[in-house]
Amino acid sequence: MIAENLRKIIEEYDFSNKIKLTASFGIYECKDQNPTKCLSKADKALYEAKNSSRNCVRVFIDSQN
């Protein structure tokens, strides 16, 4: 919810009428203690967002976690 609100704020913000910015977010709830694994899952969600429609939020859900 926070990422989606931030995405909308960035999209709607007027950067001196010259720049149009958007943002994509990859979200992963890290329940594992391995930070490398957690970052990898969040990165996967981010690349999914970038490769789909951009300017969106994607959540990676790990059924094994």
Image (cartoon, rainbow, N blue to C red):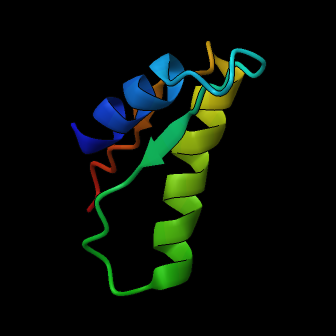
Task: Give residue 54's position: percent from left, percent from top.
Answer: 62, 20
Question: x, y percentage for residue 21?
Answer: 66, 26
Residue 24 quadrant:
top right
Toward the front, the furthest residue is: 16
Image quadrant in which you'd find residue 50: top right
Image quadrant holding the N terminus, namely: top left
Q: Quadrant of residue 2?
A: top left
Front one among 42 and 63: 42
On the picture, is 17 further left or further right than 63?
Answer: right
At horizontal 60% and vertical 53% (from top left) the residue drawn is: 43
Q: Image check: 31 left or right of 62?
A: left
Which residue is nearer to you in this view: 38 or 19?
A: 19
Quadrant of the snapshot with the C terminus: bottom left
Residue ranking furthest to the bottom = 33
Compared to residue 40, the image places residue 37 above or below, namely below
Please tell me how many numbered marks the rendered image carries: 0
Residue at image point 75% right, 22% down: 19
* Picture layout, residue 60 above or below residue 5: below
Which residue shows up at 70% across the image and 23% down it?
51
Using the image as rendered, state which of residue 33 and residue 50 is in the foreground.
50
The residue shown at (31%, 68%) is 30
Could you tell me residue 44's position as x and y percent? 59, 47
